[in-house]
Image (cartoon, rainbow, N blue to C red):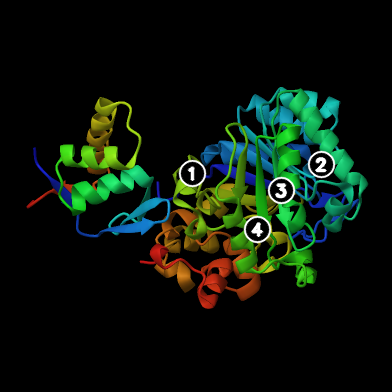
Amino acid sequence: MSKHVLRDGVVYRKEADGALIYNHSTGDVTPLNAMAAYMCEALFMERQDRETVLAGIKERWNVRDEERVRSDIDKFITGMKQLELIEEEGA
Amino acid sequence: MDHPPLKTIYFYNRNCNLRCRHCWILPGFNEDLAGELTFTEVQDLVFQGRALGLSGVKLLGGEPLMLPYIWEFIDFLVSEKLRIMIETNGTLVDDDIAARLAGCDPFVSISLDGSDDETHALLRGNPESFHQAVSGIRALVARDIRPQVICCLHSGNRHDLADTVELARKLGASSIKINYISDMGRAHGMAEERLSVKEFIDIYNSFGGKSFDDFRILFDIPPAFQSVSTLAEKGSGKTCGIRNIIGVLSNGDISICGIGNIEKELLLGNVRTHSLESVWKFDGTIRMIREDLPGKLGGVCGRCMFRKSCMGRCIANTYHQTGKLLGGDLFCGEAYRLGFFPETRLI
């Protein structure tokens, strides 16, 4: 499955309780909670695959429903695409 | 359409039954004011607003419940299916009024500046106003209207904030909004009691975004200082909707908000001599706000990632203190100057 990176002009800022993403082209700010921030860093900055990200989440949070987290990762990627904050690597 | 919809008219009664020490509007005190609009003129104002996209009217003051035609006005707004917001000191709210309000599903804010009459009276002047406001909140809650409590913070009530929050929650309020007192209007005389920017930020941080399932604690603090969890909450990070509102004083004066009562340079006309359409579409100040906000915001706002949503927060306050509408928020400017502005929020 293809990997994604943050688009040019998209700024990621780590915060104490999550992260903020600023999009220079729109001026919009997207807040991410701690798990979403972890996913963002792992998926789009460290280019990890979904299963590695899932394993990392299981290490850090008490995961009771693995399938749900897998689905959350997919939803997160879809949401980031819809906000035009990420693009396919090499695009 | 080259203009955004006029979503909300902020309608300010220029009269009040209290003389609060921090009030920025400088209303009259139980005065027989001359030249006030008639109800017919107010109806016409609303009709003009509808043609520009009006969806709600916020009633403020002074004390809005002192308007001589308040019930005709509210009934009219209900019949027009407009959203009603009321910001009151609560002293006039009893069961009769709560029953009437219950029929129109309003958003009501009531001031409560302490958990007891002495603390409340430090700003309001009259200890009885505390008991009246509490009674007003109870009356509304009994009619299934859960008001927002507004608490203005200063050095004399900061020790009492946790108790005020708890009182508001126990009374059944939906939320408490904790305001910073700016250097405007009568509050100019409160220099020694005004909290510093650092103190207000520290108090905000000490609450750590604490809220309850059915009760929210909201600070009137720029988004640049809000936690990520607060920013992620629906409705948080919102500030002044300056691009979609207009202020009308009860004498018909039009301004960008209530600032026209203390800054005559920001009077844009009067509904007796100017159509709302002409002001909304063609007034130079309104157009400047529309075209230059937030792009030409000065100060630290020009570098802040939240400028698009925050819009420089209260540009009326900035104007009052600097003579420039787009000079940049003074709270943030002070924090930046003192080194408290979060680096991660700068771009």
Disc 3 designates what residue? B162
Real-space Cα distance between discs 1 and 3? 40 Å
Q: Residue B280, how many percent across, how many down?
A: 54, 52
> Badge 2 sits on which subunit?
B
Amino acid tagged 3: Ala
> Badge 1 sits on which subunit?
B
Inspect this view and state whether residue B297 appears: no
Real-space Cα distance between discs 3 and 4? 44 Å
Q: Do the residues labelled 1 and 3 touch (CB within 8 Å)?
A: no
Sooner in the amino-acid sequence: mark 2 or mark 3: 2
In this rendering, is residue B64 above or below B25? above
Q: Are marks 4 and 1 in contact (CB under 8 Å)?
A: no
Local secondary structure at mark 3: helix
Real-space Cα distance between discs 2 and 4? 21 Å
Sooner in the amino-acid sequence: mark 1 or mark 3: 1
On the same chain, marks 4 and 1? The answer is yes
* Left or right of residue B326: residue B138: right
Q: Which is nearer the eye, A12 or B5?
A: A12
Sooner in the amino-acid sequence: mark 3 or mark 4: 3
In this rendering, is residue B133 above or below A68? below
Sooner in the amino-acid sequence: mark 2 or mark 4: 2
Disc 1 designates what residue? B5
Disc 2 designates what residue? B67
- Alpha-carbon neighbours of circle 3 within 10 Å: few (<14), some, or many (≥20)? some
